[in-house]
Every structure is written in structure tokens, then in C-alpha cells.
Image (cartoon, rainbow, N blue to C red):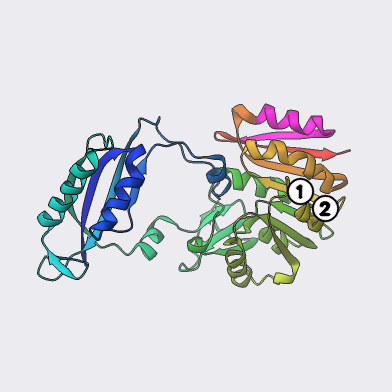
Amino acid sequence: MKWMRFRIRTKTDAEDILISFMEDIGLDGAQIEDNVPLTAAEKEQMFVDILPETKADDGTAVLSFYLEENEDGSLTVDGEKCTPEEIRGRILDKIEEIRAFTDLGEGTVSVDETEDIDWINNWKQYFHQFWIDDILVIPSWEEPEKVIENGREKVPFLTFHIDPGTAFGTGMHETTQLCIRRLRQFITPQTDLLDVGTGSGILALLALKLGIRSAVGTDLDPCTLPAIADNCAANGVDPARFDVILGNLIDDSSVQERVGEDCYDVVLANILPDVLIPLTPQAVRCLKPGGIYITSGILIERAGSVEDAMRREGLEILETIRQGEWCCVTGRKK
């Protein structure tokens, strides 16, 4: 299967009106490329280890529209067969119509052919099993590979199965690995854990597999629920041991009530500093006396601001450890 792509170079201010006018000629589903900064709401809805870096916003944008090619090379729009050049001509006509009342910027249209890609499975070639110390993290489509270390076969202490196709985090990122290593230093069979921004649940589920008593996770995205259900099933974890609460622990009183107060031996948060800092008062409220607060997702140059937030809430800073450009700050409730 092949597709024709029609790319319109324009200005960010004209994106909406162009998309609306393209719908008039049967072109739906625009792909938008621009450098408009993320809003606070958009950042809140992004469940990644670190926000993507973007170029400075120069006010330009590219809109792409895709049409599937017929066997004879023609395209079908609203039930009518057309050539790519005919479609391009219609787009240019609409552009001239819009120019009468709106600045579109460049307003050029390019056409190219793109092969159909199995987007559902193509990403699998980039994700393979890996180790975090003696823990093997392995995707569902792979079998464990033999690893020789110091002349002997490496045997995992624990194997964690994950399908990144349904997950927000895989454990590959340095921030997650920092969390896992710190977590293992503090958990016991009596540990009750709170994982704030749990995403795919990898941190809490690993802790459950390592033998903690219970885990509670909070997240903003409803997609968390099926992702965690899948990962519980893949790893033989009883879902009843992992209570997932949707909502914002920072300012949602109903979430705060469900999470509870003075309930947890460990509170874990692998989130950006801009969230960690306002989260810290709630994390302290949730911890038992002597409880541990593990934070990651922190660039080294931001570590000081997270440490200061902990000190303001009366936490003792135990250690700040680094891996690459990232660090993990751990505190204890006095």
C-alpha cells in the first residue's frame, strides 16, 4: 500500500483555518509540525521520562495530508477519482482564496509518495531486552538471551516482562534506573509504597515482585489502567496488591483523601522538577515518620531546587546520586 503526502508550508497562526478549508475539498486528518511551546496542560498530559527538546518557535508550520493510492495510481476524494496534480491544484486554489483575508506565510505545496509502514509493529526493532544490574527487563516478543559475564552465564535475580506498545515507560531511561536502584536499598517485605505518576507501573510492579507488601499508584491519564493491567498479567502480579488512583495528588482533595496520610514507608516520584517541587508537601504528608522520599527525573543542574524543596518540608537529604546527566535525590521524613 502506498500513500500520497501533500505538505503545505504555512504559519502557525493559519493552521486551524487551513485545516478547515482542506476539509472542504476532502482532506482530513492533518499532521502538524511546528515549534509552538507546550502549554502547561499539554505538559501535564505527557507521560514521558523527560519532555522533548524543541527548537525556538519561528512561527512556521507544516501541515501534511495523506491519501491512499489506488492500484492505478489515482486517488479517491469524496468518492471521486483524481490525480495527485488535480488535488494539488485544488489545494492551491484554496490557499489563494484564504490569502485574500489571512497571512499564510509561504503557502507552498509539495507532493511526494510514501510507502505504507506497519507502524503498529515497526517500533519493535528498536526495543530489546536489557539489564538493570541483576534484573532482566524483556519485551513480550523476545526470548531471554544468554549473557556471559566473568566467564559465567548471567542468571537474572528477577525477570520483568513488559510490552512498551502499551506503556509510558520501559525502564530504559536513566531516571527510571536510578529509581530502581534506590528503591531496592529501602524496601522490605513490610513496605507500603506510593508511586506518584506511575505510568506503566514499572516501578511499583518491580517493587511488588521484589516482595513489598502493597503499592498505590497515582496518575492523570486513564490509559494508565489498561497498561498496568497488562503488565500485572505479564508478570504474575495480583492486581489487588496495586491500587491505581486517577487524579492529581498535588491539588485534588479527593485523590489526597484516597491516598491517605502517614501511610507509606516509601514515596516514589520519577517526574520533572517543576512537578516534584509542588508535590513535595503532599509526599511528606503521605509518608510515615522515618519514611523515604525518592525523586528522579532531575537534570543535575536542577538538583539543588529539589533538595531545597525537601528541606523546606523538614526532610533530611540522604543522598543525591548521578547517572549521566540525571540525578536522584532521596530524603527521609524526620
Q: Residue at x 56, y 44 (%)?
A: 41
Q: Give whichever of 38, 226 is nearer the camera.
A: 38
> The N terminus appears in which quarter of the rendering?
bottom left
Residue 157 x/y as whole percent? 65, 61
The residue carrying pointer 1 sits among few (fewer than 14), some (14 to 19) or many (20 or more) residues within 10 Å by Cα, namely many
**CB under 8 Å between callouts 2 and 1?**
yes
Q: Which residue is mark 2?
A: 264
User: Observer-nearest residue: 182 or 94?
Assistant: 94
Residue 65 falls in which quadrant of the image? bottom left
- Segment tinted magenta in the rendering: 303-322
* Mark drawn on residue 125: none
Q: At which x and y percent is residue 99?
A: 23, 38
How many discs mark residues in the rendered view? 2
Residue sticking out furthest to the front: 101
Q: Which residue is mark 1?
A: 267
Identify the residue shown where x is 78% and y is 38%. 331
Residue type, mark 2 in image: Tyr
